[in-house]
Amino acid sequence: MRALLQSTGIFFLLTLLVSAAAYAEVNSVEATIDRNPVMLDEAIRLTITADGSADRDAFDSSPLLKDFVVGRTSVSSQTSIVNFDTKRTTVWTTTLFPRKEGTFTIPSLTIEGKSTKPIQVEVIPVQEQSNVARDYFVTTDIDLNEAYLNQQLLYTVKLFLSSNIERGSLQAPEMQNAEITQLGEDKQYTDIVNGRRYQIIERQFAVVPQASGEFTLRGPIFTGEVMAANTNQRFGFFNRTQQINRVGPDITVNIKPIPQGIDYPWLPSEMVRVDEEWPQGDNFVAGEPVTRIVTLTALGVVEEQLPDIPEFYPPNFKLYPDQSNTTTVEKDQSLISQRQTSLAIIPTQPGDFVLPEITIPWFNTLTQKTEYATIPARSITVVPATSSSNPSNTTPTSNETVGDTQSDLPSKAIEPDVDSSKEGKPSDSTADDASISERTQLDWVVSVVLLALLLVALIGWLLTYRKLKQTQLAGLTDSTKPRFNVTAALDEKAQYQRLMAVIKAKDTSSVPLALKEWINALTAGKAHLSQFDGVNTAVDELYALRFSASQIDKPNQSEQVSKTLEKLTDEIKQARSKWQQTGAKNSHTLSNLYPAS
């Protein structure tokens, strides 16, 4: 048993030694190609075979880049042992795409000290009459061979297939200093070319050059697998596939630089427009914000090329811009880019103002001239901040209506029948008296019913008022949204407590409404926010913090809001105290407290 184990160990040791000797070096290297000559739109399959042990990364394809485009490279290795003779083979397979016609040389390639022999390859034009060569081919087309910098080019690729393929892929074209984007989905249809029916797959790209000069737009490469003809096999699922490679023709384009005399941000396009939108309406009230949205749209450019939208406003407006948004969509074989800006505008004083026009220059690639996208100037009127209407000026109450009705009823009931007494018709007079008596009774019934309804309404109103007061007192600590209520608006103390609750909850969006209702209750509708300088200043600071928060999330945003709310609370308390002290003496003016600026 021991002898058997020793013999087995010696056998494996000898095998390892022989294998190590076989792996020690590369004996020879050979390079072959699958076709010669080759058509311009076809690919060459180059195979390098190394006899012996070789590193899988030993193949260097850089010497081939001078005359060919090198595709994907695959590597495989095989080891066999026959009669203690170990043989290892490493094979590299790559695809070469010629870019022009002529005779080219595949240079000598070196694998770990061993070199291959050079191979001459003849690249011939595409032969339309060759059925075998034209089973599968790719065509390319471009709408403009000469364009301006940043102008969109429409590039179209068509893949012609005479039979079904098992699988395949079509790479995108390539061009230096250009942004290439596929437009939409692929189109599939059939057509007859030179008497032969093809299935055609069409794909379009938008090419936007980023530098001027002459460039070559490299055609896309198609790689697929088709069923190989094999007459020895009867069953289709045993058939093997063979790989095919086709490349589209190259196209040379001339990109012109920006013309002389262009002193604005370069924007070449076929159509540019600018629009405005007022989602909250265009009614301007002093101290109240209005949002303006301006949208810039350009055809055939990417969003990075869109310039900033200019913003010029009179000095009596406070501006709180939001971060602009840009986007690019694909429609009708073209790129459409948009830049949208949102701006909160707060007029600081009433009056008539003019918002200047917005003008964006651009270069029309169709007319070769500079044009302007414009929003015309706009005249606006800013009205003063209005207070809520005085309840004393409302329509007559139910008591007044009932009183008028009661005063009218007796006059109609005792109205004498003058005509009947003159004509001396007792029967008519008696009938009229009966009619008057019936109307009098009816009027008294109506009056009693109205008085009863009034009493019920009064009781209901008192119960509702009592319940509202209880609800207000119970919900002061939980309420964060001020609700408009006529009774509460008349109660200054309740409005003040509600305002303090909103400020304590840091509900900045509800502060302006609660503040306005409190001022109306405090001054009985005789003053508005702009007359309270300290309070108005604190509110402006709060507006600034509120609108800037949507632009950048600042670490100290919450702390700034808290400080501003504390300042607003102090100003409100001071204003309330001063108004209550001087309001009893003179409630018709604020000149002693807040002189006009």
Image (spheres, rainbow, N blue to C red):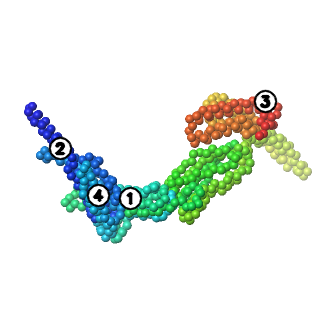
Instruction: Tell me which numbered mark, 2 or 4, is placed earlier along the sequence.
Output: 2
Q: Distance between the Cα atoms at labels 1 and 3?
A: 86 Å
Instruction: Identify the residue shown where x is 82% and y is 34%.
Output: 586
Instruction: Tell me which numbered mark, 2 or 1, is placed earlier along the sequence.
Output: 2
Is residue 130 at least partly visible in the picture?
A: yes
| Amino acid type, callout 1 | Pro
Instruction: Identify the secondary structure beneath mark 3.
Output: helix
Residue under label 2: 21
Please rate how many residues cluster around mark 4, counting C-alpha atoms within 10 Å: few if below 14, some from 14 to 19, many from 20: some
| Amino acid type, callout 4 | Pro
Instruction: Tell me which numbered mark, 4 or 1, is placed earlier along the sequence.
Output: 4
Q: Which mark is residue 581?
A: 3
What residue occupies the far front of the structure in this picture?
113
Q: Distance between the Cα atoms at labels 3 and 2?
A: 110 Å
On screen, residue 405 versus residue 49, left or right, reads right
Q: Distance between the Cα atoms at labels 3 and 4?
A: 103 Å
The quadrant of the image that shows the N terminus is top left
Res 13 → quadrant = top left
Residue under label 1: 220
Residue under label 4: 107
Q: Distance between the Cα atoms at labels 2 and 1?
A: 46 Å
User: Percent x, y for residue 529?
Assistant: 72, 38
Which residue is at the front of the view, 273 or 35?
35
- The reply to whether discs 4 and 1 touch (Cβ–Cβ < 8 Å) is no
| Amino acid type, callout 3 | Gln
Please rate how many residues cluster around mark 1, counting C-alpha atoms within 10 Å: few if below 14, some from 14 to 19, many from 20: many
Q: Is residue 296 above or below residue 125?
A: above
